[in-house]
Image (cartoon, grey):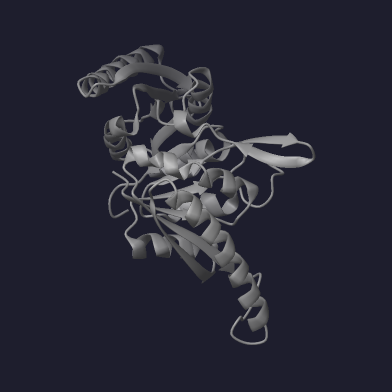
Amino acid sequence: MFEKILFPTDFSVYANAVATCVPSMQTAGVKEVVLLHVIRASDVPLPETYNLESYKFIRWSAEEQLYLIKMAMEGYGLRVRARIEYGSPVTEVVRVARDEHAGMIIIGAQGTTLSQELMIGSTAFEVVRRSPIPVLLVKAEVVKAEGHNRCRIACAEMFQRVLHPTDFSVFADEACNMVKKLRIAGTREVILLHVQDERVMKHRTQEQLSAFDREDQSRLEMRCQELSELGFKVRWLLRHGNPAQQTMQVADEQRVGLIVMGSQGRSAIQELVTGSTMENVIRLAKQPVLVIRLPNR
């Protein structure tokens, strides 16, 4: 499913915690990992001229750190290669993902600072927006002990119980297709969620709302049947309110290990007006989020 993955790292405590999760991805079919560190052009301008020595030192330091990560992952039987690029981290991550024909990007949702422990870092956020392939954003619990920040991730439990929010769009359909493949990754239980958006439905009559509920319940039941036939334990939930807020509330209530969702909703225009549900979820959810794109999008 994800035979080759790209793992960008800035060597932060958050990224190092995510690195420890990568070997557990072998249950999802991962066999090869491409490690990537990007030296920011803003940190070392014009390395080919007067900053050449600084660039060489930074590159040497990055090579040493990548080597340690590589050795650790190879100890679990993974094939690992390391790359160092120069430029904009987001641009280089997307370019290398295409260049390597990676099946997925796995990235920590926090960068070098821990001031906003549950908020996604700007680099990770832009990678999700621009990536041509699925992106797994891994969230970690930041534990402060003995004057140091440490990150804790429940890697082994990530795939066991999955929440799949759907608006029945083609993007959600593609995400559902991915959920179906997660059986080999150890997923046993799937919770399907549809949220009637209060911002869209506020001018509907009660009769219209009831009709929408009946139609969406039927759709949820059909998808439950499809997943049940594949061996999953499945439940569905129909909520009313703000889709992003309801998604995060359900994820917490149901103690899911992973949220799998499409990269865009049913109405691109409505998303622009009210804000993207996907973007709000990946920014604020405590759980890892796997964002799926349509092919060639």
Q: Position of residue 14 (x, y in %)?
A: 61, 46
- Report which quarter residue 175 is drawn in: top left
Q: Is residue 14 left or right of residue 81?
A: right
Q: Position of residue 138 (x, y in %)?
A: 51, 41
Among the 4 quarters of the image, the one containing residue 101: bottom left
Q: Residue at x 55, y 38 (%)?
A: 139
In the foreground, 249 or 36: 36
With respect to residue 14, does 83 lie above or below? below
Q: Position of residue 189 (x, y in %)?
A: 35, 21
Residue 275 visible to an observer of this rendering: no
- Viewer-proximal residue, 42 or 154? 154
Could you tell me which quadrant the N terminus lies in?
top left
| The residue positioned farthest toward the front in the image shown | 75
The residue nearer to you, when weighing 215 against 124, is 124
Q: Which residue is depicted at the point 45% across and 44% down?
A: 22
Q: Is residue 5 visible?
A: yes
Q: Residue furthest bottom?
A: 49
Q: How many marks?
A: 0
For residue 262, above or below residue 211: below
Residue drawn at x 69%, y 44% is 114
Residue 149 horizontal/vertical position (percent) = 71, 41
Q: Is residue 226 left or right of residue 80?
A: left
